[in-house]
Structure formats: C-alpha cells, structure tokens
Image: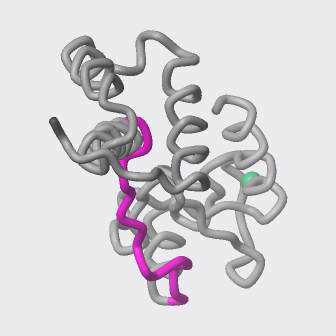
C-alpha cells in the first residue's frame, strides 16, 4: 500500500482546476496520457500520484503553449532601417508610395511576439507609420 499523505488543499485545488481546463476539451489529452492520468487519479492522495498527474498536466501545457524564443532586440536599428529603405527603393511595402526616411516604421513580417527575429531582414519591411498601423490592425483581425 502506498503511504497516504494529507494533500495540500491549495495545491489540490490548483491541480483540479488545471484538470478541468484540460478535460473541458476532450481532444486535448492524447489517449495514453488520459489513461495514465485516470489510473493515477485512483490513488488520489498519494504524493507520487499527484506528482505524476501534475507532470502530465505540465507536459500538456507545454505542448499547447510552446515556448517561443523572442529576439532580445525588439526594434530594428537605424542601420537596418537604412538597408530596408534602399532595398525597397524608398517605397512603402504596403502602399508602394515614396516614404520620408525619418517617418518610416519597421515591421516584423512574423510578429516579434511569435518569434520573429529582428536580425533577419528578410523578415522585415519598412512602412509609413500609418500603413504600419493598418497592417498591424489587419494582422490582429486575422489571428
Ligand atoms: Zn504606405
């Protein structure tokens, strides 16, 4: 018989909340993990059982919310913007009209928050400030 332990009430509440979140959507837990989870759930109050189930939950959380490595450089520097300006021959990537360099705004094609790299200039565009706002708004709607 495994040793019974008095569960930490707050921890158990947290675990139960996480379980119900995961089980709210049946397709989330893959079958084998679901079975392991249910099997472990029979030994509700043992430390080992809680630990094992918690690891399953963490595994699922990692799978559903993969860690994104964000570039530590958030913004393009002047030199990068200059390269983009020449590459685009001074034309806005959105409206294709001429830009005034000091009123340009650089855009991450793959959003910085989604892992877009500031150092990769093929992932960058130079836009009018107002065009940049338009592009960001359109991208937000598409997400
Ligand atoms: Zn423009």
Horizontal and vertical percent position of residue 51: 29, 49
Horizontal and vertical percent position of residue 16: 55, 35
User: Which quadrant of the frame does ligand 1 lie within?
Assistant: bottom right
Residue at the extreme bottom: 78
Please say if 106 is above or below 73: above
Horizontal and vertical percent position of residue 41: 35, 26
- The N terminus, quarter of image: top left
- The C terminus, quarter of image: top right
- Looking at the picture, tell me which residue is in the foreground, 70 or 52: 52
> Which of the 4 quarters of the picture holds residue 92?
bottom right
- Looking at the picture, tell me which residue is in the foreground, 23 or 108: 23
Residue at 50%, 26% in the rendered image: 22
Residue at the extreme right: 130
Horizontal and vertical percent position of residue 73: 46, 82
Whether residue 66 appears in magenta in the rendering, the answer is yes
Image check: 35 left or right of 113? left
Residue at 59%, 61% in the rendered image: 107
Residue numbers of the magenta segment: 62-78
């Amino acid at each position: 018989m495994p040793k019974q332990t008095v569960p930490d009430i707050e921890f158990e509440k947290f675990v139960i909340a996480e379980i119900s979140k995961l089980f709210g959507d049946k397709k989330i837990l893959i079958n084998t993990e679901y079975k392991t989870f249910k099997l472990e759930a029979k030994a509700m109050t043992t430390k080992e059982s809680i630990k094992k189930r918690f690891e399953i939950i963490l595994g699922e959380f990692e799978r559903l919310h993969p860690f994104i490595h964000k570039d530590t450089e958030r913004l393009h520097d002047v030199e990068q913007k200059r390269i983009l300006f020449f590459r685009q021959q001074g034309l806005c990537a959105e409206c294709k009209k001429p830009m005034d360099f000091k009123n340009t705004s650089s855009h991450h094609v793959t959003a910085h928050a989604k892992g877009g790299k500031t150092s990769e200039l093929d992932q960058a565009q130079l836009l009018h400030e107002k065009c940049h706002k338009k592009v960001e708004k359109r991208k937000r709607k598409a997400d």
